[in-house]
Amino acid sequence: MNAILFVFLIIFSGCEISPLLNHTYNEFAQAKKRISSSTHFVGSLNLNIEFDWPKGPNGNPNLESQLQLIFRDDEGKLTNLPATHSLFVYGWMPSMGHGTADDGELIQTGMGTYLIKDFYFSMPGEWDIFIQILKNNVVDEEIKISVTVPESTP
Ligand SMILES: [Cu+2]
């Protein structure tokens, strides 16, 4: 009888505190808010960011890279950042602890569409791109995207 109760308690408490279940739930909640597997969800704005490279990424410091950020609502509609908000994007190489040669210049190219041009990596390798969402010039949310940067991208 004691043995049965013991097994019962293990099963019961296991269900209640399982980190696996919590993990699955969080993944599910996140997946529901992302409009596609290639977008990143910005919780503070309830918007998705689509991230791509119109040019590069180029690890050769003499070759320009360009990043494009496209913001969409949960129905996929292009959406501008609110007037109170702005963006700051920079690159960082975590293994060596340094930044890029130039983090470039951000311009808006269309509804919900932003381009960072004149962006120059200082070398090829594993880089993190940080997208900071600022509200009244204070960082409200930061999104990190890890990229493998080759010497050049044809
Ligand atoms: Cu480096």
Image (tube, helix red, strand yellow):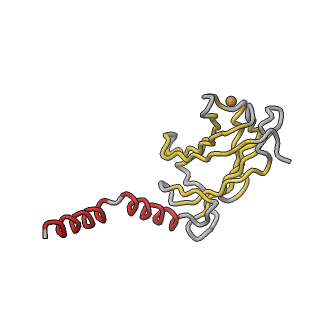
- Tally the marks: 0
Q: State left or right for residue 4 relative to residue 131.
A: left
- Residue in view at x 72 percent, y 30 percent: 101
- Residue in view at x 27 percent, y 66 percent: 11
> Where is residue 151 shown, x and y percent of the image?
80, 38
Considering only vertical position in the picture, is 44 above or below 142?
Answer: below
> Where is residue 87 shown, x and y percent of the image?
60, 45
Q: State left or right for residue 23 relative to residue 47.
A: left
> Where is residue 50 shown, x and y percent of the image?
65, 57
* Residue at the farthest left position: 1
Q: Give the quarter of the image for residue 103.
A: top right
Foreground residue among 8 and 119: 8
> Where is residue 10 shown, x and y percent of the image?
25, 63
- Residue in view at x 54 percent, y 57 percent: 41
Q: State left or right for residue 39 relative to residue 3.
A: right
Foreground residue among 70 and 25: 25
Foreground residue among 5 and 138: 5
Considering only vertical position in the picture, is 69 above or below 4?
Answer: above
Ligand 1 lies in quarter: top right
Considering only vertical position in the picture, is 151 above or below 76?
Answer: above
Identify the image quadrant of the N terminus.
bottom left
